[in-house]
């Protein structure tokens, strides 16, 4: 067999991920907070990038209509492509470049609008720091008749409480850590369990409820017995069986159960350090007459431009030797190119979010007009075909992006969902079916809650034909308990 070397020509198409495209994709999937962090990081690394002060932007520009902003973005996109072509032109890197024209022409990026004070977070959402569970318990121990050794052991106990206030260590382990007797550690634990909040430092749910029941032991002697010996029947709501075993009137058992239901199974959760985080929407949907207007929210996003300061630097490079001049020009050229790509990517991101939001509002017009019962089935392909983009791009746009409307704040993913066929031949969104199940359960008789089969029949009467297992799945997804656990006896 003979081997030979040949040259062949082959014509093919390839998708090459240029640095510009990679950066645009990266920015598109970022949430609002991540975008701000990325911009700030780029501003630290690139001296040519600077933020435009609000007073420099001009009040007139801030009040421009969103359509004008989008047109300006499209124009800037074209200019950015032309400038990038100039900056990245072929040659040895010594070609002439009109720096003065470039720096003067390239303006700040951003789409803004005049937001009213009513859109800002209310004072009720301004949280102050509250004491933690550990600080609260240590403060009580210092005010109580605890000895120094008891405070030392008590600090070890408090340090082993989880976020719900339960003890994660045994008395033997606490005693070993503090080099004391197990009985002494147990006695300190009992004293801590008498502190506020009631039920703190319990080792399990039963002990937590028993600690709280001692506060009502005189008025309700059945409480402690029910919690200690009949917790399983209590969970199954088998009150008749409890009354029969205790040989007590059913009414007294029900009164005790009602009191138990008001106890706190997670006494330490009140002092958790979790804070409510306000969602800042990326898009505002405002009703203007019979139509809806899309407004991009650039409040808080830095408005970028390329610094004019480097025009003077470029002018000062002429008096140096040739190598220094070329090195300076190459450095600034690279930074201008990087800044151009970033600004262009941000502009493209805002433009894409606007187009996708506009398409969503157009497809879900009935939802914005009439409510969730009129939410239509929608998949990524519907929006992708409408805005002439790929489905993966739409998926990136709706991830971690939020839309504010008079119906509330929704993640943009919320408007997408599967469809369920109605008996009339029409389709309904699965989210609307879930909402209908919530409405049915909310209107049911608490003493005779609907079973899943009964919910199936009620939905069928409304033209929604789904299986019982589908109802059970949707019920669990919206956090509704089975009928046996929803039943209320009093």
Image (tube, rainbow, N blue to C red):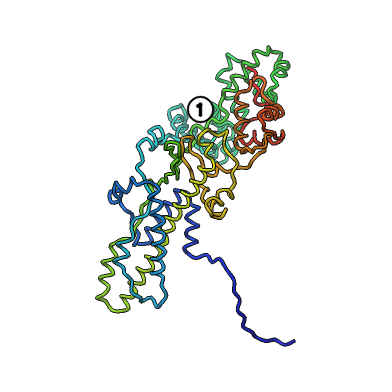
Q: Quadrant of residue 434?
A: top right
- Mark 1 lies on a secondary structure that is loop
- Relative height, residue 422 to residue 336 (above, below): above
Q: Quadrant of the C terminus?
A: top right
**Left or right for 448, reference 314:** right
- Relative height, residue 64 to residue 213 (above, below): below
Question: Residue 215: image x %, image y %?
Answer: 55, 20
Query: Can residue 448 be seen at all in this image of the molecule?
Result: yes
- Residue 98 or residue 29, whichever sits in front: 98
Residue at position x 33%, y 74% from top? Answer: 96
**Left or right for 155, reference 468:** left
**Left or right for 462, reference 77:** right
Question: Residue 410: image x %, image y %?
Answer: 51, 40
Q: Quadrant of residue 282?
A: top left
- To which residue does mark 1 refer? 197
Q: Quadrant of residue 208?
A: top right
Residue at position x 46%, y 41% from top? Answer: 279
Residue at position x 36%, y 44% from top? Answer: 113
Question: Residue 463: image x %, image y %?
Answer: 67, 31
Q: Quadrant of the N terminus?
A: bottom right
- Relative height, residue 301 to residue 489 (above, below): below
């Amino acid at each position: 067999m003979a081997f030979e070397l040949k040259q062949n020509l082959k014509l093919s198409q390839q998708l090459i991920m240029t640095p510009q495209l990679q950066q645009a994709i990266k920015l598109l999937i970022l949430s609002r907070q991540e975008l701000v962090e990325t911009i700030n990081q780029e501003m630290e690394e690139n001296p040519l990038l600077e933020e435009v002060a609000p007073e420099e932007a001009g009040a007139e520009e801030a009040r421009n209509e969103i359509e004008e902003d989008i047109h300006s973005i499209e124009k800037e996109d074209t200019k950015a492509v032309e400038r990038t072509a100039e900056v990245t032109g072929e040659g040895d890197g010594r070609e002439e470049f009109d720096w003065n024209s470039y720096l003067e022409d390239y303006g700040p990026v951003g789409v803004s609008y005049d937001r009213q004070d009513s859109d800002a977070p209310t004072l009720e959402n301004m949280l102050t720091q509250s004491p933690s569970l550990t600080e609260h318990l240590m403060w009580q121990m210092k005010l109580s008749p605890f000895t120094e050794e008891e405070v030392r052991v008590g600090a070890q106990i408090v340090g082993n409480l989880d976020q719900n206030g339960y003890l994660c260590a045994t008395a033997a382990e606490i005693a070993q850590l503090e080099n004391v007797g197990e009985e002494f550690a147990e006695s300190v634990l009992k004293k801590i369990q008498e502190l506020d909040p009631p039920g703190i430092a319990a080792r399990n749910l039963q002990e937590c409820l028993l600690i709280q029941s001692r506060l009502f032991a005189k008025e309700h002697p059945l409480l402690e017995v029910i919690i200690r010996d009949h917790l399983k029947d209590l969970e199954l709501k088998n009150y008749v069986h409890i009354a029969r075993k205790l040989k007590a009137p059913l009414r007294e058992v029900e009164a005790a159960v009602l009191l138990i239901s008001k106890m706190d199974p997670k006494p330490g959760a009140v002092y958790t350090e979790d804070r409510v985080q306000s969602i800042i929407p990326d898009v505002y949907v405002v009703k203007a007459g019979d139509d809806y207007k899309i407004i991009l929210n650039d409040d808080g996003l830095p408005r970028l431009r390329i610094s004019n300061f480097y025009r003077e630097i470029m002018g000062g490079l002429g008096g140096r030797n040739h190598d220094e001049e070329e090195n300076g020009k190459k450095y600034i050229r690279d930074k201008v190119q990087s800044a151009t790509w970033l600004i262009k990517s941000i502009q493209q991101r805002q433009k894409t979010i606007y187009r996708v939001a506009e398409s969503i509002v157009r497809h879900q017009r009935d939802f914005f007009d009439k409510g969730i019962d009129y939410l239509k089935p929608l998949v990524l392909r519907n929006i992708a075909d409408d805005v002439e983009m790929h489905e993966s791009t739409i998926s990136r746009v709706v991830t971690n992006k939020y839309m504010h409307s008079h119906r509330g704040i929704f993640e943009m993913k919320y408007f997408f969902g599967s469809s369920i066929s109605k008996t009339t031949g029409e389709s309904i969104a699965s989210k609307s079916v879930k909402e209908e199940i919530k409405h049915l359960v909310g209107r049911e008789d608490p003493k005779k809650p609907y079973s899943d089969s009964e919910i199936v029949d009620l939905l069928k009467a409304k033209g929604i034909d789904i299986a019982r297992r589908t109802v059970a799945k949707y019920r669990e997804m919206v956090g509704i308990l089975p009928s046996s656990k929803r039943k209320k006896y009093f």
